[in-house]
Amino acid sequence: MQSIYRPSLATLTDLYQLTMGAAYHATGREKDEAVFHLFFRRPPFGSGFTLAAGLAVVVEYLTQFRFSPEDLGYLAGLRGVDSAPLFTTDYLQTLAALEPGLGLDIDAVPEGTVVFPYEPLLRVQGSLLAAQIVETALLNMINFPTLVATNAARVVLAAGGAPVLEFGLRRAQGPDGALTASRAAYIGGAAATSNVLAGRLFGIPVKGTHAHSWVLSFPTEQEAFDAWASAEPHNSILLVDTYDTLTGVRHAIVTGRKLRAAGHDLGGIRLDSGDLAYLSREARRMLDEAGFTKAQIVASNDLDPDTIASLREEGAEIDVWGVGTRLVTAYDEPALGGVYKLAAVRGPGGGPWRRTVKISADAAKTTVPGILGVRRFVDDSGLAAADMIYDTLAEGPPGMMVVDPTNSHRRKVVDPDWTSEELLRPVFRDGELVAPVPSIEEARAHARAEINRFHPAILRRVNPHRYPAGLEIGIFREREALVEQAAERGAIVAPMEAQP
């Protein structure tokens, strides 16, 4: 992956990460060892699956991490509520000494992996200070691309095999949002992007022809189409809805005949408004009758998975789907909601780990303690059958029952004959990169292979089947025991009924 963020992004963080780091330093705990997990609690878009993305940017961020003199000078100027310096000189020197990789051990699911709630996408182990101060950046770099990659996969599934072009640059949330979205959409299955910078940086194919302004700049639509064909004979997709769409198709056919006479051919037409089902059927009939049976019909205009599926059900004759705003902005799901939670700590010299659990009156927010792994089981047909989150600290082999973290009545017994694989793979050890970062093409191919391993009922757009992913029975019981211990200490005060 070509470097985008050449300056260090060490200060791409929430202030409280650095103030906690300062407090760890002041209390002599910055070298304690900690394990954090990055995960989400609910799949986006009401989907039955989520597609992980963003790891390549995380790797770039960590391998270039450093607090520059300019960073440290800025931090030295921050003041507390009493106008005294917020950070001590000694703490700032500690930050200055942090090296790329921060000495962390990081395991992650590869980009393009299908994942489910509560499964760690990243497992971060290292000093309490280092593991804490990277939280915000890691969430920023995983949450949004995972959201967009999932959305793209849903669009591609709705398109039923027809190519999907990502056209969202002009509506994306700024330049970085656009680049992140283009890259994630390609991993999720989009065939190309209109974003030329994303094409240059990431090697994504780029597509695009002309806009309405081209047509409007000529006295007539026919002149505009003929001029375009003369200037771009190898890129002759004509936008036909500047005026009357079907008249535009007729003008495109005239231009197509001139292209053939010159030894070229009409690539197709694009529909960007109106009743796309009706207009595409009429356009297909007109093109076929004129002998342009290979000319493609491209459709755009605020498309999303539901609209695409509806148009296909109506018999729309559309060969390529151009999806912009509703893809790159994750239109109806603005954030993934990924979180980063402490799950185990111990002293700086090693020794036994202390499992930690955050407890909430909302059961969905009670965390999973331990140093977690994720094992995916595959049945005899080659389909993914269950995912198990387990504690690598547990003695003995994991149990063969998976329990839903939020509903203990939902359980799945794992067949002992199923094969299994670990989803978390080593990425960093002691701050050093130990695994090559897969190319975007490899991540995209992995995503396609991953999706093909799941039953169609899990992939369907409406009311998907709930895939059995959850806690190994032993870690489920361990968590319940820790919650009970907290209750006995009086740490839980959650009335069963609302106070009068």
Image (cartoon, rainbow, N blue to C red):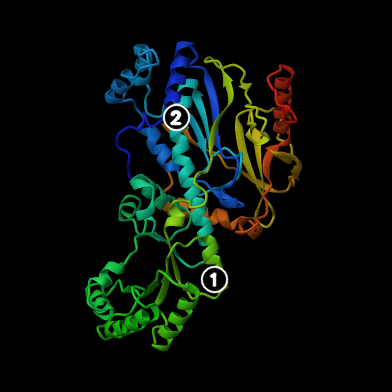
Residue at image position (50%, 21%) is 128
Question: Quick one: 443 or 163, which is closer to the camera?
Answer: 163
Tag shown at residue 134: 2
| Residue in the picture at 47% in, 62% down | 303
Image location (x, y in percent) of residue 370:
63, 28
Quadrant into which the N terminus falls? top left
Task: Work out how far the residue at label 1 is from the one at label 2, CA to CA, in angstroms.
Answer: 45 Å
Q: Amino acid at mark 1?
A: Arg
Tell me: 415 left or right of 328: right
User: Are discs 1 and 2 less than 8 Å apart at CB?
Assistant: no
Give the image location of residue 467, x and y in percent: 67, 50
Q: Nearer the viewer, residue 131 or 74?
A: 74
Q: Position of residue 247 (x, y in %)?
A: 36, 82
Visible residue check, residue 111: no
Give the residue type that dot 2 points to. Answer: Val
Work out which quarter of the rendered image holds the C terminus and state it: top right
Q: How many numbered badges does the structure rendering display?
A: 2
Q: Residues within 10 Å of mark 1 (few under 14, many from 20)?
A: some
Question: Would residue 399 be visible to someone looking at this image?
Answer: yes
The label shown at residue 11 is none
Marks 1 and 2, the one that precedes in the sequence:
2
- Which residue is depicted at the point 33% across and 32% down? 8
Q: Which residue is mark 1?
A: 312
Q: Residue furthest front?
A: 500
Which residue is painted at 38% across and 12% down in the image? 82
Identify the image quadrant of residue 10.
top left
Q: Is disc 1 placed on a helix, strand or loop? A: helix
Element carrying mark 2 = loop
